[in-house]
Image: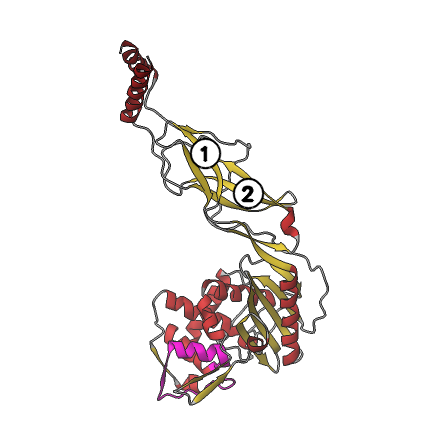
Amino acid sequence: MKKIMCLILSTLFILSPISSFATYTDTGAVPVWNENIVETFNQIQNKVELELDSESVILMDEDSGTILYTKNEHEKLRPASVTKVMTLLLIFEALDREEIKLTDRVPCSERARKMGGSQIWLNETEQLTVDEMIKAISVVSANDCCVAMSEFISGSEEAFVQKMNERAKELGMNDTTFKNCHGIDEDGHETSAMDIAIMSRELSKNHPQIHNYTKIWMDTLRDGKSELVNTNKLVRFYSGCTGLKTGSTSLALFNLSATATRNDLKLIAVVMKGPTSQKRFDDATKLLDYGFANFSNTVIIKQGTVATTLEIEKANKAQVDIVAEKDLMILLNKGDEKNIRTEIVLNENVSAPLEYFEPVGVQKCYLNDELIGEVNLVSNEKVESKGWRNFFAEILDYGYMLRKTK
């Protein structure tokens, strides 16, 4: 018993408030915390020369924003009805802010009725819901519905167009000036393939419900009295096509922002100033085929996968599993998967207490020694520091064991 008391007294003098610590692998690197997956590449140079008839094109990976193919992507051209991508984006953002609801009924002004071009022949005596308006804009590119929605959201088309330009600046669409919300030719109303890809990505990625409308091939409005047929033929004839918007006028010629998904790869192909309607679709098909044939989105690290186990001293748990906080999906050239390696970098002096999902390091992903992505590593459970009560209980248990062994 004297031995046990001596051990307790010596502990009181040696220990100040107890701190616990973890063993870790020190690579000398300082972890960089990223909320989002690090992009694989900023831009991939065209590896092949595609035979395209359109004046300007771009192919973009939706998830990362990586540019996979370009041709005159910053040339300022007339967008025609592809303008409506921004109109739809502002509609969905107004829905997100609960400024409007899908069930709201939208009146038609005389100005909206007289817009001309592609339309569903609105008149001042009827009101369609926001849901029906979105469908008409997405499927048959209804100019009258665009104006009605712009007035419903902002009070006037002019005020709505101002919001369109403000949003374009926020998105970094530096080649763009909007003069109207529908795309009918107007001097100074211009954008580029790059900017169309940017706003298409914003709409498709952050408001995927748009594809519930843009994937429609045929539908009706007004209790079946108005038939809708999609202006985007790829919706019917290209596997995986999810939208997005066509546009054509006598000056703009033929434009298209096409979105398509196969497996985990989501692509955006933009073509501008195609010489004919069919060649516009042909060029978009070539771009999408090129993307799906050469690239893949690969999950390198899966959420919840145990990366390592930390040994925690002077804590209520001897060990804790360290896991990936989320999936790490990387855009790769097909075949590069075999050249991937990962590295675990833990914070210095990881110690209890640890909260559930508390960051303790990163797992880095390299392609041929180039860092292409990383994901947070977190504690898979809560770890508490040992209190004085736990510590003395262990000492007493130890003394009891010594007495039994005598």
* Residue at the (59%, 62%) spot, across then down: 60
* Residue at the (27%, 12%) spot, across then down: 5
Residue 308 vertical position relative to residue 276 in the rendered view, above or below:
above
Task: Tell me the magenta residue range.
Answer: 114-143
Q: Secondary structure at mark 2?
A: strand
On-image quarter of the C terminus: top left
Which residue is disc 2 drawn over?
364
Residue 64 vertical position relative to residue 33 in the rendered view, above or below:
below
Residue 300: image location, x then y, percent: 55, 49
Disc 2 residue crowd, few under 14, some 14–19, many 20+, Cα 10 Å:
many
Q: What is the spatial separation of the Cα atoms under label 1 and label 2, in whole angstroms? A: 18 Å
Residue 158 vertical position relative to residue 311 in the rendered view, above or below:
below
Which residue is disc 1 drawn over?
310
Residue type, mark 2 in image: Lys
Residue 402: image location, x then y, percent: 33, 15
Residue 163, can we see it?
A: no
Number of marks in the image?
2
Residue 83 vertical position relative to residue 195 in the rendered view, above or below:
below
- Label number found at residue 226: none
Residue 101: image location, x then y, percent: 34, 72
Between 406 and 38, the one lying in front of the other is 406
* Magenta stretch encompasses residue 375: no
Residue type, mark 1 in image: Leu
* Residue at the (55%, 56%) spot, across then down: 64
